């Protein structure tokens, strides 16, 4: 885990214009890239703007007031309260200055109050305006659906399972003659993003990779890969965490999934929850910690979904798991300082990582040279299924590198991902 860099909040006319844009999203890769670049325009900071742009800077509060029956509720309505939620012993809603005065009488008991703007911002459920180019869960889901329906002859979308909070973990499959969960004997490549909630760039890269492959389906090399390989893209493995991280409109620096732990703390580190030397080093058994490995290996629905997915597809040969940030390409082992014992496999790992390093300008290293951490997904994918599995630590100075890094990160990483496709038929051909 690396040092944090808090990005400055800048609202711009261009960004606001995008937020109000109600046209259906365009799924062509070039259009998506244009959208990304069109929001890279923060100009002079306008400190007053953010506050004045918030609704309800009119002295309203969000209040919770004791109200055990309909009679009290009626009195509250008469006092001018805008009741939004009715609970067993209380109601919550909006109250302006007049109502606040009324509520201060002995008759009522105010249990809590926050300025209305603060309450509304809490339900923003989206990226801060300067990062509007990033895709939240709904936008990601919509784009994947549109890609699958526009290219229904070669692309299909299915859920590999549900998260702790019941969201679908979407997988876009690109294959010229097999759809959905139908097995294929063609060599397979798997790209997964967003194990970690706050690493939003790790959703963008595989999402735009999918758009690019479909847009370029008629390029000679891409056409060949679509005809001869079985390609799976799961951009958002941890949508619960990703949504939690953005839902107040300011970032939470949240890493884990949204499991409720035995001690009531939240979250398991999904990249410590796989069954590869589970919880032996570089992981914590304390539930409240950011590297909590969970109560047992594969305790989490998200990691279980990956396990089921990989175990059901013996044709998978190559894999990238996207994370951020370090500009590194990591290969096994990560949970041990040893090299992988198979000498040929080691050579393949080193060679393929080096080639992808040239395309991204990321440094290729053995994962444990970053730090030894057990229970990570790529160690497990290689140990359990022999998959050549790489962890990409994408670029950017911080978990929230802004829209400015998107163009480079996406275009260079597409080159590396396509290179991986070029060796997926037989990774050993590189040595
Ligand atoms: O710690 C992780 O899970 C990854 N880094 S991150 O900053 N994205 O959290 C790195 C995983 C690499 N694996 C090992 N070193 N085992
Ligand atoms: Zn990560």
Image (tube, grey):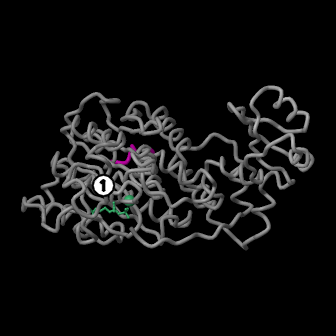
Q: Which of 5 and 134 is in front in this view?
A: 5
Above or below for 75 versus 322:
above
Q: Quadrant of the C terminus?
A: bottom left
Report the number of discs.
1
Q: Is mark 1 on a helix, strand or loop?
A: helix
Question: Which residue lies at the image location 67% right of the left edge and 42% below the top edge?
Answer: 23
Measured as percent of width and height from the top left, residue 141 is found at 50, 39
The span shown in magenta is 215-220
Residue density around tag 1, few if under 14, some if 14–19, many if 20 or more, within 10 Å: many
Question: Which residue lies at the image location 83% right of the left edge and 27% below the top edge?
Answer: 71
Q: Evaluate whether residue 216 shows in this view.
A: no
Tell me: 152 left or right of 275: right
- Magenta: main secondary structure equals loop
Q: Nearer the viewer, residue 219 or 95?
A: 95
Return the residue found at the far top: 70
Q: Quadrant of ligand 2?
A: bottom left
Q: Mark 1 points at which residue?
A: 272
Measured as percent of width and height from the top left, residue 408 is found at 47, 65
Above or below for 351 versus 55:
below
Question: Which residue lies at the image location 38% right of the left edge and 52% below the top edge?
Answer: 195
Tell me: 122 left or right of 427: right
Measured as percent of width and height from the top left, residue 277 is found at 19, 55
Return the residue found at the far front: 106
Question: Which residue lies at the image location 24% right of the left edge and 68% below the top edge?
Answer: 354
Q: Nearer the viewer, residue 337 or 413?
A: 337
Measured as percent of width and height from the top left, residue 382 is found at 18, 52
Q: Quadrant of the N terminus?
A: bottom left
Q: Which of 324 and 36 is in front in this view?
A: 324
Q: Ligand 1: does it lie within 8 Å of the C-beta at label 1?
A: yes
The question of residue 101 being in magenta is answered with no
Above or below for 46 versus 307:
below
């Amino acid at each position: 885990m690396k040092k944090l860099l808090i990005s400055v909040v800048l609202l711009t006319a261009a960004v606001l214009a995008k937020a109000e844009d109600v046209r259906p999203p365009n799924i062509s890769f070039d259009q998506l890239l244009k959208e990304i670049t069109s929001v890279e325009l923060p100009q002079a900071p306008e400190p007053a703007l953010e506050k004045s742009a918030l609704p309800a800077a009119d002295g309203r509060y969000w209040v919770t007031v004791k109200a055990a029956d309909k009679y009290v509720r009626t009195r509250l309505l008469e006092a001018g309260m805008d009741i939004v939620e009715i609970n067993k012993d209380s109601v919550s809603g909006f109250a302006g200055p007049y109502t606040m005065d009324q509520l201060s009488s002995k008759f009522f008991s105010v249990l809590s109050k926050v300025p209305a703007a603060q309450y509304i911002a809490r339900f923003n459920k989206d990226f801060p305006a300067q990062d509007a180019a990033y895709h939240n869960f709904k936008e990601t889901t919509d784009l994947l659906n549109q890609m699958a329906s526009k290219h229904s002859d070669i692309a299909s979308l299915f859920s590999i399972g549900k998260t702790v909070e019941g969201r679908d973990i979407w997988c876009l499959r690109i294959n010229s003659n097999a759809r959905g969960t139908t097995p294929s004997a063609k060599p397979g490549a798997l790209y997964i993003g967003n194990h970690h909630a706050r690493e939003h760039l790790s959703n963008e890269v595989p999402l735009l990779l999918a758009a690019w492959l479909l847009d370029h389906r008629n390029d000679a090399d891409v056409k060949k890969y679509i005809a001869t390989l079985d390609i799976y893209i799961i951009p958002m493995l941890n949508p619960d965490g990703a949504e939690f991280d953005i839902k107040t409109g300011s970032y939470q620096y949240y890493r884990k999934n949204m499991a409720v732990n035995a001690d009531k703390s939240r979250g398991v580190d999904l990249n410590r929850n796989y069954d590869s030397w589970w919880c032996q080093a570089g992981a914590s058994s304390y539930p409240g910690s950011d590297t909590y490995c969970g109560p047992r290996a594969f305790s989490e629905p998200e990691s279980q979904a990956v396990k089921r997915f990989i175990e059901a597809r013996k044709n998978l040969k190559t894999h990238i798991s996207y994370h951020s940030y370090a500009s590194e390409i990591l290969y096994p082992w990560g949970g041990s300082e040893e090299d992988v014992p198979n000498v040929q496999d080691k050579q393949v790992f080193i060679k393929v990582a080096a080639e992808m390093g040239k395309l991204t300008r990321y440094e290729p290293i053995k994962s444990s040279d970053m730090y030894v951490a057990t229970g990570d997904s790529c160690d497990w994918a290689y140990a359990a299924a022999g998959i050549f599995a790489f962890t990409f630590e994408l670029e950017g100075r911080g978990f929230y590198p802004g829209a400015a890094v998107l163009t480079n990160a996406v275009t260079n990483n597409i080159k590396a991902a396509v290179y991986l496709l070029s060796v997926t038929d037989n990774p050993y051909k590189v040595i």
